[in-house]
């Protein structure tokens, strides 16, 4: 089996496929030969007799040159990475391993919000209000007993929810087909509901974690009306795709005090424009789309890929 790998990244080393990753893959698949390509030209040449392609991006015209190709694999979870139509006999597979990393990111954000770690550290380091006032210490809470609504209860949502249970949180997952999912770690008070029931669970949410994929069906699913169904102490988190939240409506809700804070790792336009009103919104904490970054990223991808191949 010939595998052509073209997984490079100019800024994030963890997203680059290395010779070490190739050796790890061959250890599990001894019949495989892996060619690690450092540029597009070399990759396209190797594609001509490759059966498997490992890529971040794939062009439609490359299929014409890859007559033996059977699998196009990407570490990315989002279906928005490929705008291609594979020919018959070619399968596209996406990464499903991200929950092991992103679940920790989600919990870290919630702990940072609940315990005031991020906000207080910011106040201290920027020379603002150092010693806490009553208005802020009154907002400190625990995850124990908190109600966390996970909007987009797939693989990543599962991992986050399972970790949150260890802190004593109550978890409600929201997904299109709730009847398909009842994790073993659920306990009394937990549950999975359909998207049509989202409005009924938002008023009791202490934390709203968005892990939605991109697509027309998720565009501004969290609009102005839904954001204002949340209680004023609620915190919104987004580690899925930026299209799911109306950013102008979120900015207004933050500035009006309709919600307490927001932790955002993804945006409608990336990189986030300098002129985005989110940059000046009250109690917003912005991250540069790094919720899945970790040293073991590629190893997790390779381990999953070897099983699926």
Image (cartoon, rainbow, N blue to C red):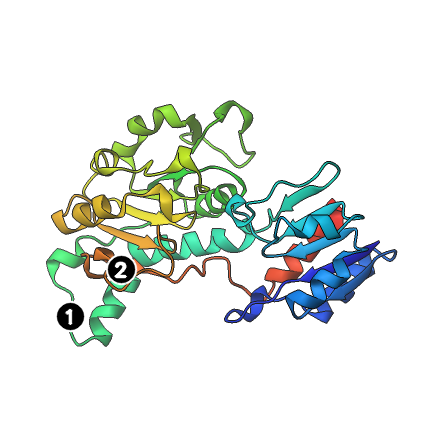
User: What's the distance in space between the residues labelled 2 and 1, CA to CA?
Assistant: 13 Å
Report the front residue among 157 and 30.
30
Give the image location of residue 131, x and y in percent: 15, 70
Quick one: SS at disc 1?
loop
Query: What mark, if any, has residue 116 been given in the picture?
Result: 2
Res. 171 visible in picture: no
Give the image location of residue 269, x and y in percent: 35, 54
Quick one: SS at disc 2?
loop
* 141 shown above or below 127: above
> Could you tell whether 31 is left or right of 211 in the image?
right
Query: What mark, if any, has residue 131 been given in the picture?
Result: 1
Pointer 2 local density, CA inside 10 Å: few below 14, some 14–19, many at least 20: some
Report the front residue among 237 and 85.
85
N-terminal of the two: label 2 or label 1? 2
Which quadrant of the view contains residue 234? top left
What residue is shown at x 50% (from left), y 43% (from top)? Answer: 162
Pointer 1 local density, CA inside 10 Å: few below 14, some 14–19, many at least 20: few
């Amino acid at each position: 089996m010939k595998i052509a790998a073209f997984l490079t990244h100019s800024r994030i080393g963890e997203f680059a496929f290395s010779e070490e990753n190739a050796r790890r893959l061959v250890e599990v698949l001894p019949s495989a030969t892996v060619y690690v390509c450092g540029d597009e030209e070399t990759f396209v040449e190797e594609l001509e007799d490759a059966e498997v392609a490992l890529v971040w991006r794939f062009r439609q015209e490359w299929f014409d040159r890859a007559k033996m190709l059977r699998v196009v694999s990407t570490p990315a979870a989002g279906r928005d990475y490929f705008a291609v139509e594979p020919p018959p006999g070619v399968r596209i597979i996406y990464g499903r391993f991200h929950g092991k990393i992103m679940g920790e990111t989600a919990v870290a954000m919630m702990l940072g919000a609940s315990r005031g770690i991020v906000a207080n550290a910011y106040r201290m380091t920027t020379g603002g209000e150092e010693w806490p006032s009553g208005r802020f210490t009154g907002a400190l809470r625990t995850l124990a007993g908190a109600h966390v609504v996970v909007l987009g209860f797939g693989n990543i949502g599962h991992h986050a929810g399972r970790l949150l249970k260890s802190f004593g949180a109550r978890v409600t997952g929201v997904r299109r087909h709730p009847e398909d999912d009842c994790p073993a770690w659920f306990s009394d008070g937990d549950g999975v509901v359909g998207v049509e029931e989202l409005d009924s669970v938002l008023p009791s949410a202490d934390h709203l974690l968005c892990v939605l994929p991109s697509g027309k069906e998720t565009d501004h699913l969290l609009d102005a009306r839904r954001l204002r169904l949340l209680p004023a102490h609620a915190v919104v988190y987004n580690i899925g795709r930026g299209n799911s939240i109306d950013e102008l409506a979120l900015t207004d809700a933050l500035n009006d005090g309709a919600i307490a804070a927001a932790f955002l790792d993804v945006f409608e336009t990336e990189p986030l424009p300098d002129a985005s009103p989110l940059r000046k919104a009250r109690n917003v904490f912005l991250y540069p789309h790094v919720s899945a970054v970790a040293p073991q990223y590629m190893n997790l991808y390779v381990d999953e890929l070897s099983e699926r191949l």
